[in-house]
Image (cartoon, rainbow, N blue to C red):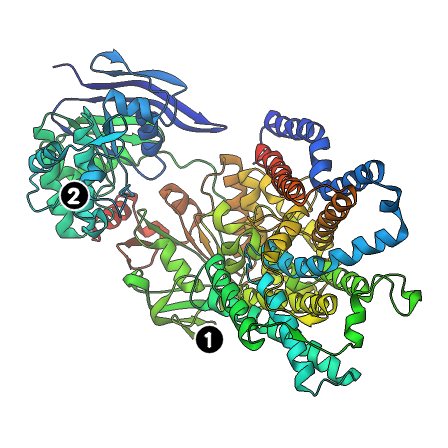
Amino acid sequence: MAPILKLENIHKAFGPVRALRGVDMEVFEGEVHALIGENGAGKSTLMKILSGAYQPDEGRMLLDGRPYHPRNPRSGREAGIGMIYQELTIAPHLSVMENVTLGLEQSRLGWIHRRRDEVVQALLSLGQTGIDPDAAAGSLSMGKQQVVEIARVLLSKARVVVMDEPTSSLSASDARALFDVVKRLKATGVAVIYISHFLEEVVEIGDRYTVLRDGETTATGSLTGLSIDDLIPPMIGRSVEELYPASSRQFGDTLMTAEDVHGLLNVPGGVSFKVRRGEILGIAGLVGAGRSETLRTLFGLREGDAGAIRIGKDRRVKASVMSPHLALEEGLNLLSENRKEEGLAVGLSVRANLTLSRLRRYAHSGWIDLSAERERAAHWVDRLGVRCRSTEQPVGTLSGGNQQKLCLARLLHDDSDVLLLDEPTRGIDIGSKAEMYRLIHEAAGQGKAVVMTSSYLPELFGVCDTLAVMHRGLLSDLRPVDDWTEEEVLRYATSGR
Amino acid sequence: MPLPADKVGGRAQTTDTGDRGGLLRRALSDFGPFIGFVFVFTLFAILGPASFTSFYNLKTILTQSVIIGVAALGTTYVIISKGIDLSVGSQIALGPVVVATLINYFGGGTGALVLIAAASGGILVCGLTGLLNGVLITRFKIVPFIVTLGTMQIARGVAKWIALEQTVPTPANWLNNLMLVDPDPSWLLFAPGVWICVAALIVSAIVLKYTVLGRYVFAIGSNEQTARLCGIRVDRFKVIVYSLCGLLTGVAAVLQYSYLTVGDPTSAVGLELDIIAAVVIGGGSLNGGEGSAVGSIVGALIMAVLRNGCNMLGVPNFVQEIIIGAIIVGAVLIDQQKHRVRTKKM
């Protein structure tokens, strides 16, 4: 049987970052094809190429044996590729029927032709009898809303349906119901590409699989008879590059202790750990496991429910009253994972961004000593090697790596004791990454305590002294990084065991 | 690890050419309001009667611009912080009513103490309206547009209530002299209101550039999340911003009282739009993080020159409105050009 969709040697680069460098994949009619790989392996890029949002630099795609080169998502959709994204695209105020036919309206002289029967039929073929086509889509549960999206894809006569992390926002029972829907979907003859981090799901629902690692296909085949442990080796097992600085530091006193910290919606759901002077603690885990939320709760950016943060020996702040203002006073500082949306005010100058959290250092009863501020800004820019023409330049004109260095420069300028670094190397090129690692080590060497998250496991192994893994809001034990294997980390991250 | 040399060089080069290509555009956006002002003024100087450039007329233009000017300074803080205040027009109606009512309440006396108390009362009421705006916006997380749309109606209603839906006459007094085109004493050259506006301008320009408050206003408007991340108590500063806007609007309201010599609850209808327009023409961006005190005053001056010049030329009112509308859109177009220059380089 010929594959319905065939990808051959797909390449895609973004500037210096080579997101995809040779992806091969074959998807057959009526199968659920699991696409797995670590964060950053290139799954999202591949899906965007498939949908038509990106164009590949190299390689070819065949749909039903014919060349498939969508110029935009619209032409991808018309060719028969249906996308179901992680974030649902339901219009909550419209009815179920209107949502199902959204973008597929057939009209005569501008009058919408109602396709009630088709909608009911589509819902029925997905095993849904309890959904009222006239109900407002926003009144349905998340799981049912997802079904509405799937029905929309069915109505659009898609040949291949791509589901990106479909269970990540669902409860366990909704997830089970979804599996049933997916089975019915494949029974209608379409091929389903199923992207998930949760390997148990993949093994349960998938027929065949493809593994991506660093933008390449590393394994593909039938899932029959395979277990989770068979899937992990092709996902990891890359050589640790010579990126990471050697470490030989002595740990000092405990600088910060999280005591059973609970956050909003129980994420984090009771996290305890401590970090010492000179120590770099890494937190691994999947996207959505609650790593960012944990750091943000500690820093007071996310509402804390219960628990406390102990700073040094004698200060203890309840998580519920922590605020960024207070955290900064107590010597905590956070590097945001979202550089452009949160980490930096891109319209303001390098100088203004650098000093924003400790502006009072230059202020005398509300007046800023601009010359002192300029002088210190120039000093820090120089010290961290931020490449810019002047400290008055708007931050938006810097490259990503330089922006990230500036974020770190702000933390170091603040002279905070505890640095919470959320994905400190996200989206920067390899050279800037190496510089970030060096700077993080330097900070630890000067007696700061560092807690960092990363979705890139080798980085945590290379940089950290201590490692813990997060799974659905809960943290594993802390162990020296040498006592972990990548398999163990991945197993805990995917199963909590 | 050093970056590959070719990449570094490549970046530097593109930045350079970008600078050269955008130089004219950059000049246009940075000095746009000034250029616009010079252009409009020159245009009327050529087209208009000789009396347009007379010293008396210049004084008139300045005097006509100060009410919008002072209120625009207050609104500048709000707009830089990515907010909006629609209630300023109604505040400029409410303030004079309060001033007039207080003067009458104190027995219609025209002593300095009474007048200062009455003027302070007017400023305070506007300041409290601003405070209310700030508290509603931050406490209940209602968008500024809606909150100030509401307080715009409320302030107007309260003004009518206090004035019993009539103008509130007051005996002639020293406050009325603030807006005299020929000031008394004459060595002041310009109306005292003009000097008040100049003082407010200098203070605002300094506050925005040299104080922590000013920096925080820019930071909040540029990226509120970053401000929060950097430990700025965003809500507190927003309340301060709206209160400050109210206080400056209160000063404008006292000038309005001085101009009208009565408290008129139906005056200044729609004035908030002129005020916002002045800020926008002066380079303020409704996307926050941009704007300047000087620019807003220049914006107010441009509108005053246009009105004055058109009146002198006998251009009908509706044409003035069309021209001012076109200038507002033109100013925003220039503003977007500036942003395009910036994003291109990202």
Residue B257 % position (x, y): 70, 69
Front residue of B259/B92: it is: B259
Which residue reaches farthest top?
A: A66
Q: Quadrant of residue A302?
A: bottom left
Instruction: Please tell me which residue is depicted at 82% across the width and 65% down the height of the picture.
Output: B180
Instruction: Locate residue B41: give its quadrant.
Output: top right
What kind of residue is marked 2?
A: Glu
On screen, residue A62 above or below A283:
above
**Which residue is tagged 1?**
A313
**Label 1 residue SS:** loop
Name the residue at 40% across, 24% down. A12
Indicate the chain on which mark 1 is placed. Answer: A
What distance separates the C-alpha of mark 2 from that of mark 1?
43 Å
Contact between labelled residues 1 and 2, with CB atoms less than 8 Å apart: no
At x 43% / y 75%, what residue is drawn? A316
Please tell me if label 2 and label 1 are on a single chain: yes
Of all chains, the one bearing label 2 is A
Examine the image and state in which quarter residue A281 appears: bottom left
Is B123 displayed left or right of B111 in the figure? Answer: left
Residue under numbered circle 2: A200
Q: Residue at x 20, y 15 (%)?
A: A64
